[in-house]
Amino acid sequence: MGRKDASTMKLPVDQYRKQIGKQDYKKTKPILRATKLKAEAKKTAIGIKEVGLVLAAILALLLAFYAFFYLRLSTDVDPEVHRDED
């Protein structure tokens, strides 16, 4: 029976390590929260690449409309000039 009593008793070094572990966990918990929030914000944030792609798409669309109407109107003007010359 002497062995059972000896095994249940913890060494002071083990108790010290356990206490330090608890303190470290308490310190790191807010740091872990901050890290998670930063990572989450980074995932949901719109990056410069996405903004650039959207602006490039809008610019290309406007350029296509401009080119379409420019070519459409320029072909209509030319026949009128030739009619007046005749």
Image (cartoon, rainbow, N blue to C red):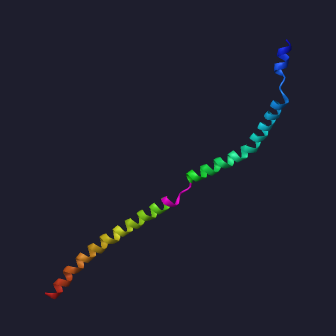
Q: Residue at x 86, y 14 (%)?
A: 2
**Is 19 left or right of 37, judged from the image as shown?**
right
Q: Residue at x 41, y 67 (%)?
A: 59
**Is 10 left or right of 35, judged from the image as shown?**
right
- Quadrant where the N terminus sits is top right
Please determine whether, in this image, residue 56 is positioned above or below residue 29: below
**Is 34 left or right of 15, judged from the image as shown?**
left
Classify residue 83 by image quadrant. Answer: bottom left
- Please, which residue is most extreme toward the bottom here? 85
Q: Is residue 47 magenta?
A: yes
Q: Residue at x 84, y 27 (%)?
A: 11
- The one nearer the camera, 81 or 24, is 24
Q: Is residue 9 magenta?
A: no
- The one nearer the camera, 69 or 27, is 27
Q: Position of residue 21 (x, y in %)?
A: 77, 37
- The one nearer the camera, 77 or 8, is 8
- Quadrant where the C terminus sits is bottom left
- The one nearer the camera, 24 or 72, is 24
Q: Position of residue 23 (x, y in %)?
A: 79, 40
Q: Residue at x 20, y 84 (%)?
A: 81
Q: What's drawn in magenta, residue-wise?
A: 45-49
